[in-house]
Amino acid sequence: ITAVDEPRSFEFDDGFADMDFNPNPDMPKARNVFTFAEHEGGTRATYVSTYASAEALQTVLDMGVIEGASSAINQIDGLVASGG
């Protein structure tokens, strides 16, 4: 976590690491921002992930980042509903 503006947003960097959690500098790193805003009686969450270059983005796209991120994000509703 690199920044928190409770209850509006938080930011974090995301990258790749080895089995001992040492960052892999040869792999792309993303800056990620989650923002929360009131919307039609509920909350709209917006997630933006930014890479340093088109090539870095293409690398993670080729690795399936959309499927992985979608799978993780789709778990949020269940966690919120369960209080977890």
Image (spheres, rainbow, N blue to C red):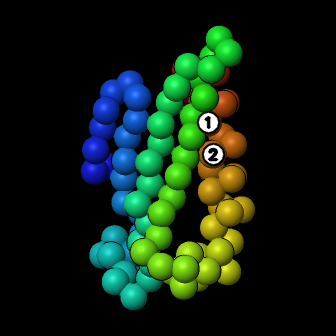
**Where residue 62 sits in the image (x, y, percent)?**
67, 80
Dot 1 surroundings within 10 Å: few (below 14), some, or many (20 or more)?
few
Mark linked to residue 62: none
Q: Residue at x 53, y 52 (%)?
A: 48
Mark linked to residue 76: 1
Q: Dot 1 lies on which element?
A: helix
**Where residue 61 sits in the image (x, y, percent)?**
65, 75
Q: Do we see residue 3 in this rendering?
A: yes
Q: Which residue is drawn at 61% across and 80% down?
A: 58
Dot 2 surroundings within 10 Å: few (below 14), some, or many (20 or more)?
few
Circles 1, 2 touching at the beta carbon (< 8 Å)? yes
Occupied quadrant, residue 27: bottom left
Q: Give the side of residue 61 with respect to residue 2, left or right.
A: right
Question: According to the image, label 2 marks what residue?
Answer: 73
Q: Residue at x 44, y 66 (%)?
A: 30
Picture layout, residue 70 above or below residue 8: below
Q: Which residue is drawn at 68% across and 63% down?
A: 66
Q: Give the side of residue 13 with respect to residue 50, left or right.
A: left
Picture layout, residue 69 above or below residue 5: below
Q: Dot 2 lies on which element?
A: helix
Q: Give the side of residue 59 with respect to residue 32, left or right.
A: right
Farthest residue toward the top?
Answer: 41
Picture layout, residue 62 above or below residue 36: below
Tag count = 2
**Where residue 7 sits in the image (x, y, percent)?**
38, 24
Residue type at numbered disc 1: Ile
Q: Do we see residue 63 in this rendering?
A: no
**Where residue 2 sits in the image (x, y, percent)?**
28, 50
Residue type at numbered disc 2: Ile
